Image (cartoon, rainbow, N blue to C red):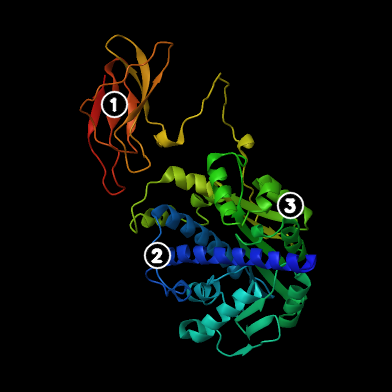
Amino acid sequence: MSSSAQKTRGTQALDDLIMATNSSSIVSKRSVERLYYPDEPHYFRFFVKKFQRRAPLINRGYHLRLKVIDTLVRRFLQKPSPRKKVIVNLGCGSDVLPWQCEVRYPESCQGVTFVDVDYPDLIQKKRQIVLETPELQGLLETWEVSHDSPIVLKSQKYCQVGCDLRQLATLQTCLDTLFDVPNTEFLFVAEVSITYMDTKGADGVIGWASTLRHAEFCLLEQILPDGPDHPFAHTMLKHFNKLNTQLKSVHRYPTIASQKKRFESLGWPSTESWTLWETWSDDLFMTAAERRALDTVEAFDEWEEFALFASHYFVIVASTPHPEIKGRVSRSLGELDVQSCRTPMSTSGYEAGRGHRRFGAAMLVEAPDGQKFISHSFGQGPNGRPSSEDVYQISDQPVAPSSSREGPSSRVCHTLTDLGSIGVLLAGGRASPSTAFNDCWLSK
């Protein structure tokens, strides 16, 4: 086999793995659609054969992703402009953005065309589902189908382009065929898609889009704010490596600051950016009332994990003309007015089999003989909420194992308050997210 044939086969295998990430993602989005949007038409269901309810943490994370993209697309739709608007979803997979926008913002979608772009094989499968599903076909009104052009489906409101994003000349030709490009305003959306490309190729897509006269680029993908060795980052990267779909751009552009410089160097003079954790508390994306309403859908209090997830994703909106609104930039920790101090510290390995997520619930305890030690109790273990404790010595004297004693039941999310000579007050906590405790215990 020639080297070129081997390369082609290897590239196709990688492309197949990347397309497979759509299957997992779309199942999660379907879970969010069914639980969090009961009063809207459901479109993801046509691309997911069997509904699978995801865990609350996954649901909350995907809900936030969908909400952020929806908000920024809505802002583009509602922005006054004398030009025709086109929204291009790069690496669209089975996303149903055109149908959702048509239902949510019908007036703003008048005269707007949505373009889905992805690998030819995936786009052809999506075309078949769209044409065979009356609820999806209704958006098209009248349409044209092509079997010998990258523009496989064409209608006034919705088009599909089967194009490898490494072939930018083909994509440019398709847009020139469909639209009067100089007099068209584009929004390119890339939600965790071009990060699977080689960084040079992903940069090529961003740089190419900046050459259009009137354009915005919305990129949502992973970052490494505390480096690849942070426990969450390490687990995230390991997950994608195991799937053989490594995240490429995140290593060259690990922070929002580096992403901002990336876009500026590739021809985008104006940018706005947020981590997803920042979007969670920004009224642009969700009001406090909307956030509270989510708790009526399913109980949720995995805030530590949610904060970690959301801090490792970001969204940036770049514009070729300067936007009418003042650009927003996510602040780095170095810019925050937080006092710091240095303290000597040493660490040692902790066997994975013993690890429990104690969530910082530790207290200083004094034994009858006057010896002091730190007790770290309860938390979340590998198989539930343990009633055990970790005991740490704070002197050279060994710590004797504590005898079993009656006390509070297993729990997480409780508080510990040091009352000085009186003791330490444990208050509240919960078992499952819907089972809260109202008891208090005093440890002396």
Q: Which residue is mark 1?
A: 425
Position above or below: 40 against 216: below
x then y, percent, for residue 325 = 65, 57
Separation of residues labelled 3 and 1 (CA atoms): 51 Å
Q: Against 59, is 277 above or below?
A: above
Which marked residue is nearer to the observer: mark 3 or mark 2?
Answer: 2
Q: CA distance from mark 1 to mark 2?
A: 42 Å
- Amino acid at circle 3: Arg
Residue type, label 2: Gln
Residue 405 higher or lower than 120, as above or below: above
Q: Secondary structure at mark 2?
A: loop
The residue beneath circle 3 is: 262
Residue 410 rendering spot, x and y as whole percentages: 28, 37
Q: Residue furthest front?
A: 1
Residue 397, image x, y percentages: 40, 11
Q: Position of residue 31 (x, y in %)?
A: 42, 64
User: Residue, x 40% and y 67% (percent of image)?
Assistant: 37
Q: Is residue 365 left or right of residue 90?
A: left
Q: Are marks 3 and 1 in contact (CB under 8 Å)?
A: no
- For label 2, count other residues whose C-alpha is less than 10 Å away and answer few (under 14), some (14-19) or many (20+): few
Question: Residue 411: which quarter of the image?
Answer: top left
- The numbered disc on residue 7 is none
Res 432 seen here: yes
| Residue at 46% in and 82% down | 135
Residue at numbered disc 2: 52
